[in-house]
Structure formats: structure tokens, C-alpha cells
Image (cartoon, rainbow, N blue to C red):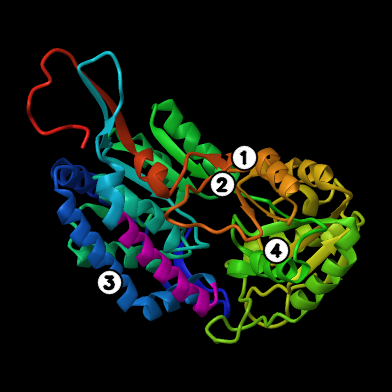
Amino acid sequence: MAIRTLNPATEELLRSFEPFTEQQVDSCIERAQKAFLSYRHTPFSCRTTWMLRAAEILEGAKQALGRTMTIEMGKTLRSAVQEVEKCALTCRFYAEHAEALLRDEPAPSGATKSFIRYQPLGIVLAVMPWNFPLWQVFRFAAPGLMAGNVGLLKHASNVPQCALAIEEIFRRAGFPEGTFQTLLIGSAAVERVIADPRVKAVTLTGSVPAGSKVAESAGKLIKKTVLELGGSDPFIVMSSANLEQAALTAVQARIINNGQSCIAAKRFIVAERIADNLERLVVKRMSGLRVGDPLKEDTDVGPLATEDGLREIEDQVQCSISKGATLLCGGRRLDGPGFFYAPTLLTNIPKDAPAYYDELFGPVASIFRVRNVQEAIAMANDSAFGLGASAWTEDAEEREMLIDQIESGMVFINGMVVSDPRLPFGGVKQSGYGRELSVLGIREFTNVKTVAIYGNAGENRSQTE
């Protein structure tokens, strides 16, 4: 696959790059290994200084970086700038807290002294998607580098300028040479990188087939993986909910990133008693969204990132309608250049329709009606995915049932699902395994080493401070 920047709003080819040769890739791996052998011993004070500097660079260049994201994959400039700011926030979080999160942890036992030590693994390969070109990378890279690992980035082939910009940010921040490198390679070259014995682990955010292939390649070599895959997140609204707020948030949660987000609300599951009113509010808001040039400040929804993505969402909607689903608004690609698709709402969706089971990666929502909270939970769980879930209720008993019984890695009550560096992020079922962010994220790619000392533990530095 070509490594190039194709503006999805204009279909203009802006820049292309030659993929790295095998020799170039091998040189990058060699630099990374050499860097790790010394970088792993750098004190937290040095890593903190460099990571805080990375945050400053991000904040100072947020408009330029945001524009690069917009022209490469079509997200609105407003949301792109917010994404850069979030990356900076995450750099600061791990710069300030990594040492404490990785501190030796007491583990009482029959030994004189016992504790757990968290040590870096080495080179971690990150296979990242195009939908959040900076955020997806920084939520791996910030904790990974602060833990003492080094990173190799294989980014999506349609966002090469974002990939190179990230490497430059870490270089300018002062991280040693080879600590973080971008590999301009296609998907076919990933297996060879995983097979290199110097690469110790892999993290992937992407599709289920991509995750399965990476997990298979790494699993054969007994290498650690973290997978964040697709999602078909439910957005449950019960009768006691604040209807206006739920409807407003539902639309926001569905069209975030032009509808191209794993944690976007995709299935609106609504109590029958309020379904007509919520449907009316959502149709009104979806129909009123401004679709157009993502560089303009007043644009709500930009283009899909690729022509293939546009074709897929168009096929899924048309197939769902042909099987009996009712179209309430949208349902078509927009005229003119660019990969634009109208915000769409479907209802009366049969089980054999793509809108029932598939992940719809675009500004398309589906509404389902249920009689009670038990039916809502059953429908929410009737999915191969289990990433996030948003549920709206003012009833304490319903709230506890929703929290306890929904099969997902994250449940947000009376709010939309978001990622936050302070909270674990990840899913279950075909949404993947492992966790990013928080204390769990920074420990994913460490050797969790048990230490037990018998006899005289000595008077050296306490391992449990």
C-alpha cells in the first residue's frame, strides 16, 4: 500500500513517501536496541524533563499539528487541536506520576522482605490507526517511554506526516537517539518486525482482523501484546434519564471524529416510553449538523478518512435498508469532491442487517427500543464487541444493574465514553485485551518482577518506599 497523504476533503494527493527498505528497518531496530541498553538506566528526573518538554512542544505547535491531522484524515480542525492538547495533558500526567506508579511495591510473604519491581521490557512496536493520529500514539508512547521502554511506530499509511511529526517531537524534546522512531512501512512488513528477537512486545489499535494477525504473529514467539480493537458501543437511555441532555450527548458521542471512533456511541438503546421523544430530538440534531470543509471553524462533520471507508458505510446502510431498516435521516454520500457522508439515523433494524451487528465506522446511528432495563442490558450485550458503554438513568437500582451486567471494559453513567490518562482504557470480547492509560497502562509493558529476600535484608535503600 502506498504511503501518502491524500486530502479526504478534496481527494488531492499532497505528498507521498517511499516505504523503508528491509535494510532501513533493520537499522532502526539496531538503533532502538542500542538506545534501550542505556536509556533503561536513565533516572526518572531525566525522563520527566524530556516528557514535559514534549508537552510544551505539542502545546506550542497545536495549530500546525492540528492542520496536519485535518488534511491527512479529515477530522475537523477544532477537534484536531483538542487532540493535540490531550496528548500534551497525557505527557504531563506520566511525567509527573510515572515514578510513583512504578515504585517498588510491598508484597507481604514469609520472606524477610518481599516486593514487586516494575522493569522495562525493551523495544515495543506500536501498530497504530489513522483515526486519532496523535492521540493513539501518545497514549502508548508517554507511559512507554516513562517506563524505560523504547518505541517503534508503524502508523497507518494515510497519515505519514503525522507519524514523522511525532518522531520529531520526541527528538526535539531531548529523548536520546533511537528512543522513538517511525517506520514508514506497509502492513505486509509488520510480521517481519515482530519476528525480530530484539522486539519484545507489540501494541495495536485497529480492526479485529489486524489484531488477530498481530496476536498470532506475536503469540507464536511468546511476545506480549495489547490489543484495542473495534467497538459497537451501546448508548442506553432509560425512562428516568434527563432526555434533553441524553439526546444532546448521544449525537455528540456518535459524530465524534466524523463518526470514526471505536468508542463512539453506535447503538442507541431506548426505553419505549421515551423512544418517540428521543428519536425526534436526535433526528432534529443529526439533520442540523453542518457537514463540510473540516478546516472551517463552524463545521461539525468532515469527510470520512478514505474512499474505502465511504464505500463501506454506504454499503452497510443500503444493505440494512434493503433488509427492512427504516431511514430517519441522511443515508447518502454527498455530491462533489471528498469522502463526505450525511449524518444518518436508522431504526426498526432486523437482526440480519449490518446495522445490528457490524461496527459502523462513520456518522451513522441505530435506534433500538426496549421495554425495561433487563432488555436494554441483553441488547447491549448482544454484540461481538465490548469496548465501552454509556447508560443514562436516575434510578439507583437500574444504575447498579447496568454497571454490573454490561459486558464491556468501560461503563459511563450519564456521560459519554471518553479516554482519560487517569483511567484504564480497553475492552473485552472482540474489542481486545490489555489496558492503556492509568497505572495499568504504564505497567502493561514491564516485567513485573517478584523479589523475595530471606535472612538479613540489609540496611540498604528500602525497596518498598
Q: Which residues are magenta?
A: 74-94
Residue 330 appears in the rendering: no
Q: Residue at x 67, y 59 (%)?
A: 265
Q: Earlier in the sequence, mark 1 or mark 2?
A: 2
Say which quadrant the C terminus sits in. Answer: top left
Q: Nearer the viewer, mark 3 or mark 4?
A: 3
Q: Give the labeled residue for mark 4.
A: 311
1 and 2 marks in contact (CB < 8 Å): yes
Q: Secondary structure at mark 2?
A: loop
- Secondary structure mostly seen in the magenta stretch: helix
> Please, what is the three-letter code of the amino acid marked with disc 2?
Leu
Report whether 439 appears left or right of 37.
right
> Please, what is the three-letter code of the amino acid marked with disc 3?
Glu
Q: Earlier in the sequence, mark 2 or mark 3?
A: 3
Q: Position of residue 415 (x, y in %)?
A: 63, 61
Is 90 a magenta residue?
Answer: yes
Q: Give the labeled residue for mark 3.
A: 56
